[in-house]
Image (cartoon, rainbow, N blue to C red):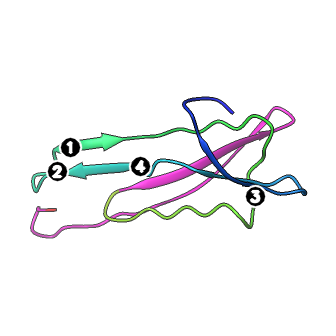
Amino acid sequence: MWGKNIEVLNITLDGQIRVLHLVAYDSSDQSGKRIAHNAPRLRLVNFTISSSHNKLVPIGCDNYVYLKGFRHETAYWTGCITYCSWSNGHR
């Protein structure tokens, strides 16, 4: 594993690892100006993205989350996005 100290919650015999990781956030004021932001990253060299166990959920407006993985030097991406349209120009 790469980065700061990461708390490992579980390692299974079939090769799955569960870790505790920071939650990303992006906060804006009413005019849309960013007031707080973080984008934590996690790199696990010997593990791949699971199609059934990785869960990502963006919450709020105009946010996105994604996972990027490699297998045999080919990059794979998955994710989702939220978008909110505001008719009065305010968030």
Numbered mark located on residue 24 in the image: 4
Q: Residue at x 44, y 62 (%)?
A: 58
Q: Is disc 1 placed on a helix, strand or loop?
A: strand
Question: Nearest the camera: 86 or 40?
Answer: 40
Residue contact at pointers 3 and 1, CB within 8 angstroms: no
| Side of 38 relative to 33 (left or right) | right
Q: Which of label 1 and label 2 is nearer to you?
A: 1
Quick one: label 3 or label 1, which is nearer the N terminus?
Answer: 1
Q: Residue at x 64, y 29 (%)?
A: 2
Q: Which of label 3 and label 2 is nearer to you?
A: 3
- How many labels were placed on the picture? 4
Numbered mark located on residue 50 in the image: 3
Q: Is disc 4 placed on a helix, strand or loop?
A: loop
* Callout 1 amino acid: Arg
Quick one: label 3 or label 4, which is nearer the N terminus?
Answer: 4
* Callout 3 amino acid: Ser
Residue under label 1, please give it. 34
Q: Is disc 3 placed on a helix, strand or loop?
A: loop
Cα–Cα span, label 3 and label 1? 32 Å
